[in-house]
């Protein structure tokens, strides 16, 4: 996919798209080795999935979301630099120093520098018109805000008045932390910010969006967190493995980010999957759903955003699971779903799935092997198509939902 764009001159060669020191993903980096037998994958293919919330697939957000730092589990053990070449912490947890990867680029090809950090903190987080209250994660235990010092084009320092040992957890996994809180594409947002552009030049854009004032408009234009995987983010520079392209609430489409900063142990730029397409499906009631939980840190194509009801709405020959021929320990059939390799920015949850969703022994290796297009999900067919139905009836009665 990307090789064709390089051949036509639309993209520079891979050597110019990666940072000098890419983030290398291998065994135990994003997912602990005990939970995944990691293998190098190959390129190609389209992942098809489903979502129930118009314009948003929570599972894709979980899959793509990147914190400022990374870890293979829910915690701060075995931290990885992720966006940074290096980082350090002083002995009393008051000074945190970070060095961005030199050559790191936004999805539009512009370089990421400490100016993007300075802009995010000083011009957005400390601007009371845009951020009336500084989020708690950027304050030490006494409530005092952090101090940001830019050391050079790639290095910056965050300091606190009091020891703040929980800061690393806050910027790694707490509250679905996204890099977008502290690193923003300043080249894209400065023309929309009154510090750099006169308000009268921005007013036509505000009127075009039918908004009341500049803070409301900038809050809409400054896309963060979950918004980065929604249609409003088309054209917005990101650091995700996939970028959203022309999409509507009914169909979300993503393509590989040609400037993604991550490679596998063979030196191949990730992700492997070329495209992701998510189709809107409907439920009988948004309050009456039972999500299919994924295992091993991978994301189910019908995970938090879809249910058995959503699965039944999809074309049967294209979207239904197929049996792998294995059996789970509970006696259910192991089903195979088209999905993506875990090593592409997914988040591992140290939680077990519901009853009947149990791993087999030994662990399957197909999640990242071969084409890297298949994940294995343990679904007890009896629980899935009979037990869930009975459970949902009881749940609906208890919550006052009416079954149609």
Image: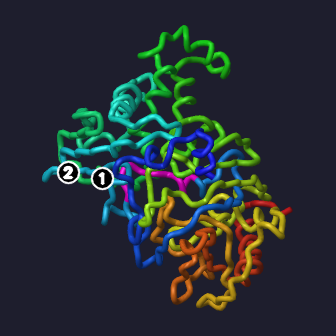
Label 1 sits on a secondary structure element that is helix
Label 2 sits on a secondary structure element that is strand
> Label 2 neighbourhood size at 10 Å, few (<14), some (14-19), many (20+)?
some
With respect to residue 93, does 289 lie above or below? below
Region in magenta? 61-70
Q: Can you identify the residue that label 1 sits on?
A: 168
Q: Position of residue 258 (x, y in %)?
A: 54, 47
Cβ–Cβ under 8 Å for marks 1 and 2: yes
141 relative to 28 in the view: left or right: left
Q: Position of residue 345 (x, y in %)?
A: 49, 58
46 relative to 179 in the view: left or right: right
**What's the mark number on residue 403?**
none
Residue at left offset 63%, top offset 55%: 274
Residue at left offset 35%, top offset 48%: 20
* Disc nearer the start of the sequence (1/2): 2
> Label 1 neighbourhood size at 10 Å, few (<14), some (14-19), many (20+)?
many
| 140 within the magenta span | no
Residue at left offset 56%, top offset 17%: 213
Q: Quadrant of residue 226?
A: top right
Q: In the image as oriented, which residue stretches furthest toward the right?
A: 404
With respect to residue 160, does 288 lie above or below? below
The quadrant of the picture occupied by the C terminus is bottom right
Q: Can you identify the residue that label 2 sits on?
A: 89
């Amino acid at each position: 996919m990307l090789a064709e764009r390089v051949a036509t001159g639309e993209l520079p060669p891979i050597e110019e798209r990666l940072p000098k020191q890419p983030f290398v993903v291998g065994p135990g980096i994003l997912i602990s080795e005990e939970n995944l037998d990691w293998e190098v994958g190959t390129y190609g293919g389209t992942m098809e999935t489903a979502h129930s919330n118009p314009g948003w697939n929570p599972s894709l957000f979980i899959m793509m979301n990147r914190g400022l730092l990374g870890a293979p589990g829910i915690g701060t053990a075995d931290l990885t630099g992720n966006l940074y070449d290096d980082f350090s912490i002083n002995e009393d947890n008051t000074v945190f120093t970070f060095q961005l990867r030199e050559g790191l680029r936004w999805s539009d090809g512009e370089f990421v520098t400490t100016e993007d950090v300075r802009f995010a903190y000083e011009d957005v987080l400390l601007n009371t018109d845009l951020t009336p209250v500084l989020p708690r994660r950027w304050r030490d235990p006494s409530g005092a805000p952090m101090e940001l010092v830019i050391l050079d084009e790639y290095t910056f320092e965050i300091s606190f008045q009091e020891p703040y040992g929980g800061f690393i957890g806050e910027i790694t996994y707490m509250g679905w932390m996204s890099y977008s809180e502290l690193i923003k594409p300043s080249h894209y947002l400065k023309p929309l910010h009154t510090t750099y552009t006169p308000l009268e030049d921005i007013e036509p854009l505000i009127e075009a969006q039918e908004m009341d004032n500049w803070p409301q408009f900038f809050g809409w234009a400054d896309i963060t967190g979950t918004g980065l995987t929604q249609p409003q983010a088309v054209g917005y520079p990101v650091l995700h493995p996939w970028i959203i392209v022309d999409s509507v609430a009914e169909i979300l489409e993503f393509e590989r980010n040609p400037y993604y900063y991550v490679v596998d142990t063979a030196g191949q730029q990730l992700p492997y999957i070329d495209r992701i397409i998510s189709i809107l499906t409907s439920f009988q009631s948004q309050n009456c759903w039972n999500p299919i939980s994924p295992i091993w840190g991978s994301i189910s194509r019908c995970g938090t955003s879809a249910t058995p009801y959503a699965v039944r709405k999809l074309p049967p020959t294209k979207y239904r699971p197929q049996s792998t021929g294995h059996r789970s320990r509970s006696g259910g059939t192991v089903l195979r779903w088209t999905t993506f390799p875990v090593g592409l920015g997914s988040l591992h949850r140290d939680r077990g799935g519901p009853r009947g969703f149990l791993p087999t022994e030994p662990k399957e290796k197909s999640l990242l092997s071969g084409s890297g297009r298949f994940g294995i999900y343990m679904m007890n067919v009896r629980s899935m198509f009979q037990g869930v139905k009975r459970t949902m009836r009881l749940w609906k009665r208890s919550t006052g939902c009416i079954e149609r």
